[in-house]
Image: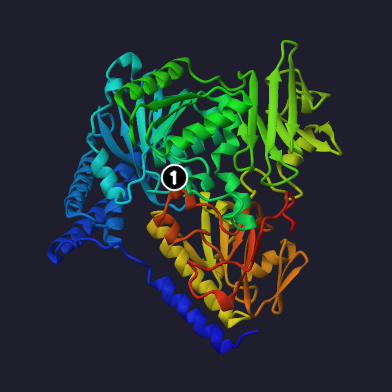
Amino acid sequence: MITSLRVLLLLAAVVLSANCFAQDKSPRPAAERLQKFHKDLQTLKQQAEELQQQQESQTVDGAALLHDAAVFARAAEWMLRFEEFPKPNYADQLEEVLLEGLRRCELLAAGKPDWNLREETTIRGYRSGVDGSLQPYALTLPAGVNPRDGRRWPLHIVLHGRADQMNEVNFIHRMNGRKPPENAVDPEQAWIQLDVYGRGNNAYRWAGETDVFEAFADVRRRFRIDENRVTLRGFSMGGAGAWHLGLHYPHLWSSVGPGAGFVDFYAYQKQDRIKDRRPFAQHETLRIYDVDNYALNAFNVPVCTYGGENDPQLLASTTIQQACEKLDVPLTVLIGPGMGHKFDPESFRTYMDFHQQHASTGRPGYGQRKKIRFTTNTLRYSRCDWLQIQEVDRVYEPSVVDAEITDQDLLRISTENIRMLSIARDPAAYVELDGTRLPLRDAADGLLPDVWFTQENGDWKLLDYAQSRAASRNPDGNKRPGLQGPIDDAFMSAFVAVRGTGTPASAAAGKWADAQLNLFQQEYSKWMRADITVIDDTQVTEDLMQRNHVILFGDPASNSLISRVLPKAPVGWDGDHITVGANSWDASAHVLCAIFPNPLSPNRYVVLNSGHTFHEQDFRASNSWLFPRLGDVAVFSLQDTQDLRKAEPIWSDVFDSNWQPR
């Protein structure tokens, strides 16, 4: 036990460290120019707000066009907030962005927007459901696109590589006005192209992953997209993103094209899996993102990967190639002769021809896929076309499905580490699950789009209509897709941070929670490019909890929401002790971080005392470091916590499939 004075002194250092958030060194523009930038930004924001008031009763198209203008203001605001001027010409780029934003507002006010169908790359914006922020993306239109005619267009989703000096303004500068790619000149081969910003440099993880799908959804709202002909590709960090999204969502793409990138943390960081093994919770949750664990999923989507002969990142291609060979899964590997970290022209032509060929064919329509071979290590990525894994026996271990529709109108499936799954009723009349034959097409009275099955004591059981409806509501509160942890998972969809307004039982723990919230606000704003919503515990309503994960900071005495959720939580916390299973700690010298389903809103999370579990040093390092650090639950000693960005828990773990301590 340490003295209260010592704890308070240590926590003062924590708060100081959190407030001393490192700023990038940059050639700051002259004061007069900065003043003008701020003045122009306020003018742009005011014009966008006035248009917003006028647009409240307008169409969805009108709101989208307003976002296309307002996103320029947001880009400028973030650049000025963090003074992101790594080179002198960035000030010129900011000036361009402010002028274009003002120009778009003037055109909207006159009812004459000129960018919506422009046959080149233009910047668009959408409002994110994660945090309400406006986020940019680039859209390239070939000739002849008209959302009002009946033609549906192929789409290429392109993920950019890492660019440490790129922010929203620089992304806009790079993209706005770019001409269509040469391959899109032929009308018969043309496609719409979405270049994703992805909130900067996070390898399309966490909110960066959500950004890909939200930008995709925004394009689908504006234009007629043939969803059976969507190509996903990227290079370098974009290659890592294409590996990640391509093999975690294999049923969505007509083909996937990862160029370079990384697929395995230990190998990419040149760390020994034994000697340099991460702490247990970190090692387990690396399986979320280590794509070599998902090589089997390339069976479900054509993949053409590229690496330069002399590029260390060729390792990504050869790692997946070796895994696919063992699994008898096809994979096309291109190697650029004598090349480093870039494409050679001949390989790029072959690469693009591959994707054009598969876009012409298109992926199987829903329910038309005859065979699935699918694996996952987390319920976050649990669907392949007409089949979804709903519950597993053992978390962070491979769950595997091998399914085939036979000529006898039978769906034959073998499974591993799966205790509940749902199957669309369309593929076959019957399903044979690990040798047990059950009805499918007419099951559950033929009333539900998906039929649910559960495994009990090694035997598969069909759920009837009422049981299926009940199972879909997850009455036992088990780990399910989108509700499986770890802590960082809560920041992939809508969330609100909640601070306590009461007096903490431990003053030191209260200061720690305040410092943690402060650090979360700063780091999320800088690296995830948005502000989080922070409210008092007295402001939380039932409706808010139905729509958001709640991130609670404080202890049961200071935050009334914590005291309300604890009676049905897998952890205990009172004035004396923190308990998790058989483990117990002194509450006056320790603090608890955790994630679990919200007992007051079971389809949403509660998180205790944590934002993202990786920090500034990880964002500044390789993107491969952006993996969970705390699992589902962790305890910190206040004695050891002088810098929250470097703090290590004294204990951490993941909950089991039932959200219980292991």
Q: Is residue 486 left or right of residue 16?
A: right
- Going 60% across and 88% down the picture, which residue do you hit? 3
Q: What colour scheme does the image use? A: rainbow
Q: Amino acid at mark 1?
A: Ala
Q: Is residue 583 above or below residue 297?
A: below
Residue 2: percent from left, percent from top: 61, 85
Instruction: Tell me what residue is drawn at x 31 percent, y 49 percent.
Output: 168
Q: Quadrant of residue 82?
A: bottom left
What is the secondary structure assignment of the residue under circle 1?
loop
Pick the front one: 332 or 189:
332
Q: Which residue is mark 1?
A: 203
Q: Nearer the viewer, residue 422 or 11?
A: 11
- Expressed as whole percent of the image width and height from the top left, the position of residue 543 reads 58, 55
In this rendering, the answer to whether 282 lies above or below 327 is: below
Q: Which quadrant, please, contains the C terminus? A: bottom right
Specify few, some or many for label 1: CA neighbours under 10 Å numbering under 14, 14-19, or 20 or more. Answer: many
| Quadrant of residue 392 within the rendered picture | top right
In the rendered structure, the answer to whether residue 367 lies left or right of residue 458 reads: left
**Camera sees residue 248:** yes
- For this rendering, which residue is in front, 218 or 265? 265
- Residue 50 visible in rendering: no
- Seen from the viewer's position, the closer of residues 115 and 626 is 626
Q: Residue at x 72, y 10 (%)?
A: 407
Residue 139: x and y, percent?
32, 34
Residue 470 x, y percent position in the rendering: 76, 41
347, above or below 126, in the image: above
